[in-house]
Image (tube, coloured by chain):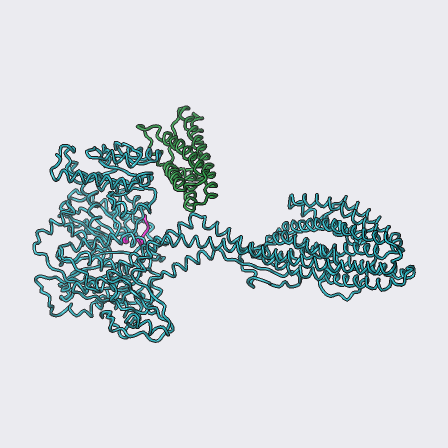
Amino acid sequence: MDTVSQLQRQFVEYTASLYREGYLDDQFTQLQKLQDESNPDFVVEVVSLFFEDSEKLLNNLTTALHQENIDYKQVDAHVHQFKGSSSSIGAQRVKDMCVVFRNYCDEKNLDGCVVCLQQAKNEYILVRNKLEALFNLEQQILQAGGSVPMMV
Amino acid sequence: MSFLAVPLEFSKPFLKICKWVLFIMSLNCKLSGIKGRLLTNSKMRKAKEPLKGSNGGWKWKRLLLFLWVFLVATGFSWFLFGFVSTQKLEISRTSEDNSSGLIQQFNVSKDHLHELASSFFESDQITSLKCTKQLEHETAEKNVITCALEVPYLENHGLEKQKYVESREKCCICDENIPTKGDSSISSDSSVPLFSQSLPSIASKLQSTTENTMQTMALGKFIIEHFHGLQYCFMRVCLWAIFAMGLSYQISGLHRKLWKKRKRKVHRKKDKVEGSSRGAGKWMKKLLVLFVLAGVAVSIWLFWYLSSGISFRRKETLASMCDERARMLQDQFNKTFGEYTERTSFERPLTSGVAYALRVRHPEREKFEKKHGWTIKKMETEDQTLAQDCDPEKLDASPIQDEYAPVILSQETVAHIVSIDMMYLGASYDIPSLVEKLLHQLASKQTIVVNVYDTTNISADINMYGPNETDTGLLHISSLDFAIAASAGQLIIVLLLGHIFYAAINRIDTVERDYQEMMELKHRAEAADVAKSQMLMDTNLNAKQLDFAQTAHASGKDLIKLINEVLDQAKIESGKLELEAVPFDLRTILDNVLSLFSTKSQEKGIELAVYVSDQLPKVVVGDPGRLRQIITNLVSNSLKVSPPSFAIITIYAHYYIHLVVFNLHLIRLQFTHDRGHIFVSVHLADEVRRPLDMKDEVLKKTLASVQNSLNSIVVYNTLSGLPVVDRRKSWGSFEKLSGTDSIDQSENIKILVTVEDTGVGIPKDAQSRIFMPFMQADSSTSRTYGGTGIGLSISKRLVGLMNGEIGFVSEPGTGSAFSFTTVFMKKETSSLDTVLQQQYYPSISEFDGLRALVIDQKSIRAEVTRYHLQRMGIFVEIASSLYSAQSYISSDSANLDMILIDEEVYSHESDLALFLGLKELRPTDSTNIAGIVPKIFLLANSKSPARHNELKSANLVSDVLVKPLRFSVLISCFQETLITEDRTQVTRRKPPTLGTLLCEKKILVVDDNVVNRRVAEGALKKYGAIVTCVDSGKAALEMLKPPHFFDACFMDLQMPEMDGFEATKQIRSLENKVNEEIQSGEVAVEMFANVAHWHTPILAMTADVIQATDEKCMKCGMDGYVSKPFEEEQLYTAAACFFESG
């Protein structure tokens, strides 16, 4: 019983820190709200989709930026995708990075794009780790027999 | 940044560095003094020389040598002290061994110094520590240093303790060597060795002094930088000092090597000379001297040539570097500005297509006028009364000016408008200022301040470049680091010259100047660099670009509005504007105007109200659009000039006799709002002329309010309680208002609309030209309140077209009132009126016959509320205070259905009082005989959801009505509270929620992004929809091909291959084709699931709000848009449009 409440507190604190540090925004809360009995794994499902999608996109971007003649339209389309999916799950920092990235794309600034890609990658890995940790915590709470506290 | 801001902790290091510098200075002085003594010694030695010397011919050579030496020494001493010294110096000869010993020492110390220099760079702390250490060492060792002919002195700067011991020992040895070796060298026969011996020694001295001076200068510069720039912290200074020293030592090492080579060369020459026959004798020696002298001369020239070449090239590269930086800056600027122009390009053709102003100088005026066929007119006529038309013919020719700016209207529709001198237009739309602002924004970010100081004069440095004020708080850009690093090359040149050639002092002087120039160039280069990076940084900022885009966007919208207005004006003037004649509800039009401004008025805290006299028929025939335009213009004008409401502090004493038994006295400090108002009232023109008792209640009161104000009554009986102007004056000049009208009374109806505000008013001198196009009260008006100033002139013309008149009265500080009359036709059949009304609001009959009590202390406002309620058929009673309301409630047995209380009844009291007051009403209600509990509504001025929710949750009020009151708002509110609760369950009309709206609806989601698709699906499923997803526009096309079972489609806009717009277009064309086929009977309806008309609602989903302009979505056949990620409220409003009916 004690472990559950401890885990729950830890969970709440961790989630709050994610919001505070800007990894996540309100959209993630919205996502959590969409999860109910009829759709118990909605958040995890969407987030895993995001992970798959992001990794694919980041790979595509890396190859696109390493070509001799860079098709900035293509790059922009990828970044747009990335921005869309990151904003859908509320990965704020990734989304912000994408906005900057798109600007460089418009300018056809290769250096800027490469730097942005690297930063976007970093941000993505960060948010992935954070979210995975969050889900782990969630699992632990569930295993310990508690319920996941809802963030308001 | 400023001197005052230098943290206290820096004061200590400051003191230390001051000490250090002073010490160095004193050392220099001592050094020279000792040297002087030393030189005297050697002079004595030299005096003996002639005795020992065997050859008499030596004398003139000596003299020559002495002359050289003298010159060098003078220059050197001058260099050392910074002023021309009268001190005579002679230079002694020193032995070859001595100098070689020195060289050894130098080489040894050099290696050590290298290590030291690198170690010094490691940390500031260590450096500072070592610096202080050095200070101690220097004090202790100065005697030794001076003994070693100044050279070790320089070394000591960078030496550690152990090294010191070593050097001291060596120095001592050297010292001992001096007399013996000196003697031996003096006894030497040959002049050449002597020459070569003295050369290095003097050169070394020179070099060391040069270095010394340079260092002192560098230090001096640092200090001056420190004092004047006030930016360098102590650590930095130390670091740089050490760095400079290290550098100079490296250089010195280089010199040594070079010098060695040269020496060897000279030695070789000497050997050669000695190898040749001695018979050649004196001639050969003389020749040799000459040869050497010539060689020296050639080398002078060569080095001068080279150095000038090098310095020239250096300057050139630096200049080109500067140019490059400048170009980069320029590029950056052009790029940013280009971006801006690109973003605004869509609106520019529009502006240039309508009108433009041209600059015409007076001498060109005649030519210009001839060319265009008209004269430049003055903007205002001499006596412009308010009701006069702006007739171009009446305008005077513009008086003689230096410059004119006539407007040239390039479109044909407006070509007839006579060009008017723009210089007289107080405020036109200010595009240049927009651009200027933008430019300024750009420029302000890159203010380049370059300050270069001549720091050679320690007492007062001379500003060589840049603004005079040094303490502006601007970023002080210093490139001293660069300057030193880059001048290393320069220093090499300097030292090479100084080392090889005796008269290098002149060269040093030149180089010194070059150095300063270099400094300047460097400063410039670095400033440019900083600016560039700042610029880059700034433009990289997303917010900045967003700001640009927003500015452009906003200005674009403004421009388009202006253009529409200009075209309107043009249309009216050319008589192309035709008025409609359709039946319409006057009150609905006014409600529309209110809704348009409700948000703005709530934001500003201005009370906005509409009152239509009950004498007016419900429906009239005319042009509703134009009437709305006039009223909108007037109201927006009033709203613009109305200052936001302000708060004043008042102290009130309240007596709650019936609540508090003992403590009766309560004093509260509170904020109350004295809000302005805008009051639109519509009456029959005839009403004004009627005798007082026949007049409408509101009209009576509004007219009376001004009369009251004459009797100095503090609280005015107006909408907001603020004084207003006498509105009667606004129609005072109307010709057709009173007296016999030519208009047929039986068919036509003349209405009088008055818009009254409590704004700033119009200055008296500007009142005459208020209806002129592009004219506002003064040029600052457009800047303060925005707008183009064309609205009123259009209003005037529209009123004219509607057979009416417009006029106004304005009192600066009090407000204005605009009145206009228009003539409409009466609607014949009145039976249709109700039909019309019922059409919009089918449930209006539900309220018929209800009874309401309005509690409001301001009678006009109460009347306005009554007007709105009466429109719904509600019978209204008015009470001016809570107290009278209570007595009314208790006395009157009539069953009240609702009580409406204005918030301001309580505004003088606390929330507590409001709560208690409301509670007070409730118990009496419950005792009501009829048994019906009246619903209490609060009429609120502004939205404060928290407070309102509190009231609602406390069950004190049924609902809060936020003003301005509108028919639609009232109906929906009453429906919700009265009907749902009072009526039986059968007629219950629960407001539809998203759940009920989307439940069981089949929805197609189109998005290429899998994550988005999943989220959208999840969101829609939550509301009970049955969701199908596809990932491309083409797939959507396939799915939505009739017949299908989808109730709606949510479509992403930006998709690869086929975007949302294109997909929608194709779906629509597909649907149309099917519809046509069905209509024409080609295909049976049964084939298409019995749906005769196919139109699947398509909603755009977008994260980009700018992209999703209504217009663009509608154009390609979409029904609306929702922003991504979904927001419940927005999704509801968007979905409600097409699901509610179905």
Q: What is the quadrant of residue B757 in the picture?
A: bottom left
Colour in which chain B is drawn: cyan
**Colour chosen for chain A:** green
Viewer-nearest residue: B490 or B971: B490
Q: Main secondary structure of the magenta part?
A: helix
Say above or below: B719 vs B991. below
Residue lying at 90% horizontally and 61% vertically, measured from the top left? B55
Nearest to the observer: residue A98 or residue B811:
A98
- Give the image location of residue B554, x and y in percent: 34, 54
The quadrant holding residue B579 is bottom left
What is the magenta range?
Answer: B904-911
Q: Residue at x 86, y 56 (%)?
A: B190
Instruction: Provide residue B677's location: percent of width, then percent of height.
Output: 27, 58
**Residue B1130 visible in this rendered orientation of the protein:** no
The x and y percentages for residue B41 are: 86, 59
| Quadrant occupied by the N terminus of chain B | bottom right
Task: Choose between B9 and B852: the one closer to the eye.
Answer: B9
